[in-house]
Amino acid sequence: MRGVFLLFFSSTAIALSGCEPMEVTLDGGAAGDASSGPSGRILVESNATLTLGYGEAAELAVRYFEEGAPRAGEPLRFALDGTAQDAALRALTVTTGEDGRARTRLTAGSVRSVFRVRVSAERAAPAWIDVSVSDAGFGGLAVDARYEGARTDEARRMVTVYAGVACDPAGSYPASAIARQAGIEPGAAPEVTFQTLPAGLAYTVVGEVLGATGTRLASACKDAIEVVANETTAVTLRWEDAALAPSGEYAVELALELDDLGAVTTRGLDAGLAVAPPTAPEMLGALVAELRARGFELEADALALEVATGTAAADLASALDAAGADPAEGLRAFFAALLPLLGTVRVEGPLRLTYEAARIGGAWDARALSVGGAHDPDSPPPLPVALGDARLDPSLRLGWQPDTDTLAVESLSLALPLSTLVGAAMEAALAERTSVPWLALREAAGCEVLARWVADDAALRPVCNAACAEAACLAALDGALEAAAAAVRGEPSGGSLTVRGTVAAQDDDGDLVVDRLEGDLRGQWGGGVASPVGVSATFDGMRAHP
């Protein structure tokens, strides 16, 4: 980057002699801050591109303006920039006349060279005059700077022609060796032509792809280029992308699509049905217990008496039959609604990546777990799952592939048996009274029927609302649900999720730091009573912190 932008040096020398290359700048004094005071402008009126033979002289004429009008009495400084050899300027500082004009004389040296004359003022950006000196004629370079790399096709490109230097792998070039330079803006034609270069010199063409902040995203270099007099030599640049830096903190979501878990849920359903789901008398007994828990002893005693006589149970059984409700069907509906949720599991948390000495490391703090929320717009929202004493304990083994900008996920594991996940999802579905499995259970098992039965009873209606009736219904189902959960969980030791694959890295803002991570992983999940099931996963990460 220094070879592109830092072009100026200062010296108080006023003449050059000898034939050996000498890297200097002839300058009549330091330029002031061009941003202070009125805005000035320097216009080159003589030829802005000079081709001179040995010892040939040329007049340099410029005109200075401020606020659109010529300005007299302004000192302008002329300087030789680059390897000017033994060229010389007659005057280094010239004061503008009444018409704002200033003139000096440049005399070419006796060595082939290519350099520039800089004209500066205290309150204006510098103006430039390209100069080529040769005894063998002049030619040109037509540079194809077409970039088709991975960084960005909207980046600015800078093409610089150097004289007398070779390609440097470190990209460090002396500013004094710059012969010509041109920028290619996004969307512009990818070719640039440099004319009037001295024949007989060896040239190097360097290309840079620059991000919005000036970061070098890609580079190219071709050296030992000979310019032939009166001809234009074609040069094609071969680009090499700069490596991305995969480091910092990323907000990561791992979305897992699980193969059929029907065997696991069937095991739970069978265990629940084996307990004998509650009948109408058992549901009413749970309602009596709920009333006592809420402090309504008189109403609980009255209902218990009705249950003992059989009238209340007969009324409720009739209502259940009329509605087609059955606790056993409720269990079936619960697991039927739970199974689709278990097909998608999401794990979220911050991922910290480190990249040093070409080695990448990662630590993932997987904090949030949910089921459901598939991409289908008709799917129910994700259901958060609390693991209780269980832990995810994620472990990562990563590799970085700079040539393809990919993160190799050699192994990503969660030390969570699949059976533990299913059991925790059951508990979450029962605790969340708006979850699809709970709603299916309530409707099919008769919980809504029990709530309506309570609402129709003049004695119970004031003391037991819908939530009270639902709590009693769930309590009546507890035995079957607990048996189902125990059957699903089994022995949780030894199971885990393991996936692997590749993740593509993206730099969105042209600073060579990875901003997004996206990829597909595959593996399997097993543990407890569950046989391992196949898993496909999408890995999405967004940079959160440096």
Image: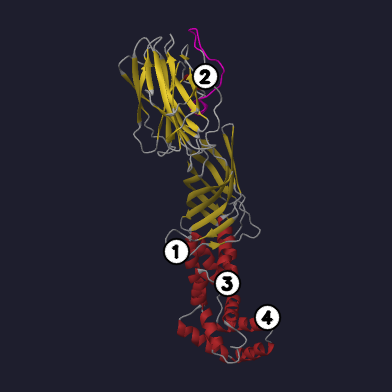
Residue at x 68% of width, y 83% of height? 292
- Tell me the SS state at disc 2: strand
Number of residues whose C-alpha sits closer than 10 Å to that of mark 4, classed few (under 14), some (14–19) or many (20 or more):
few
Percent position of residue 186, x then y: 39, 38
Residue 498 x %, y %: 54, 47
Which element carries disc 1, helix, strand or loop? Answer: loop
Give the mark, 1 or 4, whose residue is nearer the N terminus.
4
Which one is earlier in the sequence, the residue at label 2 or at label 4?
2
Residue type beneath disc 1: Ser
Q: Quadrant of the C terminus?
A: top right
Mark closer to the chain start, 1 or 3: 1
Q: Which mark is residue 293?
A: 4
Q: Is residue 20 magenta?
A: yes
Type of residue at label 3? Ala
The image's colour scheme reads secondary structure
Sequence order check, earlier mark of 3 and 2: 2
